[in-house]
Image (tube, helix red, strand yellow):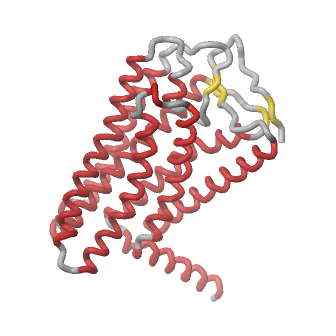
Amino acid sequence: MLSGKPVLNQSGPPEFVFRVFTNVPEFQALLFTLFLLLYLMILCGNTAIIWVVCTHSSLRTPMYFFLGSLSLLEICYTTDVVPLMLSNIVGIQKPISLAGCGTQMFFFLTLGGTDCFLLAIMAYDRYVAICHPLHYSLIMTRKLCLQMVLGSLNLALFLSLQLTALIFTLPFCGHHREINHFLCDVPPVLRLACADIHVHQAVLYVVGILVLTVPFLLIFISYVFIASTILRMRSAEGRQRAFSTCSSHLTVVLLQYGGCSLVYLRPRSSTSDDEDRQIALVYTFVTPLLNPLIYTLRNKDVKGALRNSIFRKAASHWS
């Protein structure tokens, strides 16, 4: 496999190039194969969730509507990052234009923000289902579910557009603008600016609080009420079922919010691009890969629907 230095346009519009993971061809091949396999597993796992939710009438409930929406977000989220990342692992690195970098950042922030808001909505859904089961169908209507998902997307679009536009009004230093990352994320791009970025960092913290801290607090409050209700349940089977559905969601929440908070909410003086890049691998690959595994392995309804689909497919094939 080829490797070489990127050729940047020295006189035209600003261009960026991503720092390589390694220059050793054998390691490049290994990383390319590993990341490609992870990406294909993410696509297959989340597509399976969407397919099962759409094709099984027993799963046409608010909880599974949100789960299908989350899987669709994960597919789009990783597709915004991984194909470009794979193309830069092998061969001569291709520079990305200022507009291309801004576009990737915008979609990355929009999809990631919507993901965080959706996890808060899923916590509210569990709160209503467990704490107010008799009113669940009256509260969680199809119209409200759709409005909440679209509202999350619109809010994330608004915040991402403002932040991306603010960052790309900055001048960037030097001809060799190397981003120490595998994507156009906010912190490493800000480090390339040759202007005062205190205002931009303050805006980043505000957006981080709105996207990460506020939803996480809402999730925490929801689970305080949920835990109180579960502990008062007389039926051990009911407690087990409620705990099972909530533990899957909590696992995803901790992975997503934990990784993103370490990148976006830590003081800049205590972080480095190398650390951010390693943490970003978690919420770019690990979380989207674990989502379908966590929800299928810990959810009897999804497991049953998948099993029935496989048996039905096998039966139709042999008949």
Dividing the picture into quadrants, the one containing residue 206 is top left
Tag count in the figure? Answer: 0
Residue sitting at the far front: 270
Q: Is residue 232 left or right of residue 253?
A: left
Residue sitting at the far bottom: 319
In the rendered image, residue 268, in percent from the top left (x then y), is placed at: 45, 26
Residue depicted at 78% across the width and 27% down the height: 5
Dividing the picture into quadrants, the one containing residue 156 is top left
Instruction: Assign the N terminus to one quadrant of the image.
Output: top right
In the rendered image, residue 99, in percent from the top left (x then y), is placed at: 57, 25
Q: Give whichever of 53, 16 is nearer the camera.
A: 16
Residue depicted at 54% across the width and 34% down the height: 104
Q: Is residue 188 left or right of residue 248?
A: right
In the rendered image, residue 112, in percent from the top left (x then y), is placed at: 44, 42
Q: Give whichever of 127, 169 is nearer the camera.
A: 127
Q: Give whichever of 12, 181 is nearer the camera.
A: 181
In the rendered image, residue 125, in percent from the top left (x then y), is placed at: 27, 59
Residue depicted at 57% across the width and 41% down the height: 278
Residue sitting at the far right: 1
66 w.r.t. 20: above or below: below
Instruction: Assign the C terminus to one quadrant of the image.
Output: bottom right
197 w.r.t. 83: above or below: above
